[in-house]
Image (spheres, rainbow, N blue to C red):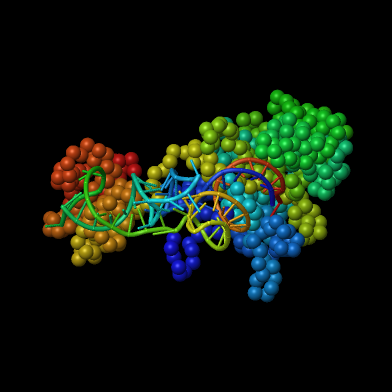
Amino acid sequence: MNIETGPIPRLPRGFRDIPPEDVLLRERMIASVCSVYRRYGFEPLETPHIEYLDALGKHLPDVDAPDGGVFAFRDDSAEWVALRYDLTAPLARYVAEHEKEIVFPYRRYQVGPVFRLEKPGPGRFREFYQCDFDTVGAGSPAADAEACCALADALEAAGVERGGYIVKINNRKALNGALEAAGVAPASVAESSSDNSLVVLRAIDKLERVGMDGVIRLLGEGRKDESGDFTKGAGLTNSQIDSIVRYLRASGDGRSDVCDALFEAVKDSETGREGVSELRAIHDMLSAAGFGEDRAVFDPLIVRGLAYYTGPVFEAALTFETVDERGEKKQFGSVAGGGRYDTLVERFLGRKVPATGASIGVDRLMSALKQLLPPDASAYSAPVLVTTMDPSLMPEYQKLVFEIRGAGIPAELFTGSGGFRKQLKYADRRNLPLAVICGEDELNSRTVSIKDLLLGRELSKDIKDRASWVDDRPAQVTAPRSELVATIKKMLSGSDI
RNA sequence: GCCGAGGUAGCUUAGCUGGUCUAAAGCGCUUGACUGUGGAUCAAGAGAGCAUGGGUUCGAAUCCCCUCCUCGGUACCA
């Protein structure tokens, strides 16, 4: 704290270090999810963390976007480059750049960190992982349906039980049809970002948090929350609001019935009718694949992101309840989402290229899995520590540790400084289950001693005096040197490590 | 961006109606009792000058202002 020279060690705002158990959990999770993607025929792709700023479709930080957005800087030829903020924009660039070589439909998945220069919030950081899969060059609702199936399968592979999640599907065309019917939207979905319909979509997107009453207020004059903060509304008339709410309240017994109800709400709009018929096609595909209502439903409340989706949109939510800081129960909520975006590649090629895909929020899903899966105690360090009682025997210890590693058991040689006492303490503090001990006695008798530290810790609860604690050498066995590995294996398996 | 709470040893906190605070405690850490054994116990010890800068005052961790950061909420989210 009182350092007068040198830099202060600190993490940049919005970034974090990932502890070992989380790194391993993430690796396992990503491996399971990606194996599902591969099973669906998606192939991997890696693009760099950095792209040209204009390829990402962002503006310069200071000039055009005072609130920032991306980490950008000039490279050695004074070109603006930036850290990618998602994996979709690089995909669009890749597809446009290799248009002639790619065999369409192109299906790829990609995992990696993305970066956003915005205010960190609860569970929001400036660097986080995304895990995307997309199909480019296929306009059929079959591709959308498949994305929903892959999403469901991926969640199950990651460890979420069936019933613990639900994929909710809506269609932006249908949604837009509802807005059109209410007289607040342009005829084209693609232009919906430029007017009041954005405000309406935003309002709907908040339903989960503010409730239907809140949404209705946001559609009208606006809404004031508990902290007194006022959010300006869309300023719709009551009859317009009624019309939209009719769409939002559309429900039915099963996907097919929901489609009927949605159709009723949008039947005056051509775009709307188109959207509903896409949903029906998706329903047929889901049903044929055996995906029932327990895995995928149609939900008119799903909006997703705001700008670029042009057709079906979907979101996967976890349905189990969690208890937050205050002990209040609430559903875990959304961990993945996606949809159809037929205009993204257009920026590069000047014509529409249909695309659909989804992205799993790796960090969100991870925090969910932590609550679902039993904790995997200290699986990240080597289970065996070879202690070095006599420094002159280091070569001997080296032989021991390599013998153990040779048998496929992760093992560590104590290379720090300090006496034997300190070494055992080190192993204990790190929760290592076994310590291999070899001093003069063992060397002379061609044996090794192996201490079960976890068992010993249990036994120590009944210790009354130090002499017996030391002399009895609890939870320790001495075996012939030749049986080193066999003994370790037996002890590791016998104690549920 | 806006509203609110807060920043005191590695960690968790006490102190905050200004004056033995040259800042306290628990945990953790170091060393020894215990020269080949983790726990417990006992003893000794290291470690912050109170986020930063400025102001008020005879005197500030304590009061006031700026900035930074953290944590909530809200807005935004390609």
Looking at the image, which is closer to me, A468 or A438?
A468
In this rendering, the answer to whether B33 lies above or below A183 is below
Quadrant (top left/top right/bottom left/bottom right) for the C terminus of chain A: top left
What residue sits 30% from the left and 51% below the top? A427
Q: Quadrant of residue A53?
A: bottom right
Residue A459's x, y, as percent? 24, 39
| Residue name at image x 30 percent, y 61 percent | A416
Residue A305 against residue A248 in the figure, above or below: below
Residue B58 in picture, x, y percent from top left: 49, 59
Q: Quadrant of the N terminus of chain A?
A: bottom left
In the image, taking residue A190 as reference, residue B28 lies left or right, namely left
> Can residue A170 be seen in this snapshot?
no
Pick whichever, A122 or A405, lies toward us: A122
Which residue is most to the bottom? A77
Residue A156 x/y as whole percent = 55, 39
Q: So how many labels did they put on this image?
A: 0
At 50% from the left and 55% from the top, the residue drawn is A17
Q: Is residue A37 left or right of residue A17?
A: right
Would residue A48 be found to the left or right of residue A276 on screen?
Answer: left
- Tell me if residue A474 can be seen: yes
Tell me where residue A494 appears, x and y as whole percent. 29, 41
User: Measured along the vertical axis of the image, is residue A259 above or below residue B67?
Assistant: above
Closer to the camera, A102 or A474?
Answer: A474
Q: Nearer the viewer, residue B62 or A272?
A: B62
Q: Is residue B1 left or right of residue A415?
A: right
- Rendered residue at 53%/44% (across/down): A366
